[in-house]
Amino acid sequence: MKWCLRFAFLLLVFLPHHASSQQCGEGSECVPQEDLDDLIALVEDQHCMRASNPTFYMGSLTIITDKDGRVYYSGSEPQPLTLRMVWCGYTLEVDVKVDVLVAESKPPVWGFRFRPKFAGSFLVLDAIERSPQEGVDVGILWDFLYWHDFNLNVATGYRSAGLGVGYDLTSNFGAYGGYAFSFWTLKSNPQLGLYFGFW
């Protein structure tokens, strides 16, 4: 508080008195009212700033990632992030540009894997030469190589074993076509079927 009084005293001594000065008493002069008001406001501001801390308000930034991995932030258009400071009657507002950097790991388009799938298939020649019931086979497809939605499978079933290509229609369901050897008729058969992946 002492430095405020010293500062006020210096202002009173060095303020220009020629602008509407008037005699207040013998050997002294009055301070103009507008200068006195400025001095009081300055002292009050200094006191307020020493006694209180600034208050900061920050706008929000919303980041949304959808199930396809696309990223959106602050709505459909990029918006600035607003920072506002309020302190002793003064307000400062700043807009900050926001750059959102998203690191995405894209899955490989091909590779080896272990993916067993339950399959229901149809042995074409056995169904034609014997009966449709004897052409039906169920078993497991052992998916070990993929490229995009295509996959290579070893087929083991109740009636046959073989090799073929599958195509994922969804993440865990697809169609299969290949060639299999029938245990029952001891013949090779074209094989068509559908499968359901366990993962």
Image (tube, grey):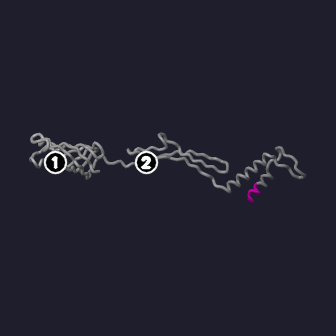
Above or below for 3 versus 136? below
Outermost residue toward the right in this view: 26
Q: Quadrant of residue 187?
A: top left
Q: Amino acid at mark 1?
A: Gly
Which element type, helix, strand or loop, lies under badge 1?
Answer: strand
Within 10 angstroms of label 1, few (less than 14), some, or many (20 or more) residues?
some
Horizontal relation, residue 30 to residue 154: left or right: right
Within 10 angstroms of label 2, few (less than 14), some, or many (20 or more) residues?
few
What is the number of the mark on residue 13?
A: none
Cα–Cα span, label 2 and label 1: 44 Å
In percent of the image, x 20 and y 46: which residue is there?
120
Number of numbered discs present? 2
Which residue is the site of mark 1?
162
Q: Position of residue 77 (x, y in %)?
A: 48, 40
In percent of the image, x 76 and y 51: which residue is there?
40
Mark 2 or mark 1, earlier in chain: 2
Horizontal relation, residue 122 to residue 107: left or right: left
Secondary structure mainly formed by the magenta segment: helix
| Quarter of the figure with the N terminus | bottom right
Which residue is the site of mark 2?
102
In percent of the image, x 56 and y 49: which residue is there?
58
Q: Amino acid at mark 2?
A: Val
Q: Position of residue 52 (x, y in %)?
A: 66, 55
Q: Nearer the viewer's eye, disc 2 or disc 1?
A: 1
Horizontal relation, residue 56 to residue 152: left or right: right
Segment tinted magenta in the rendering:
1-7
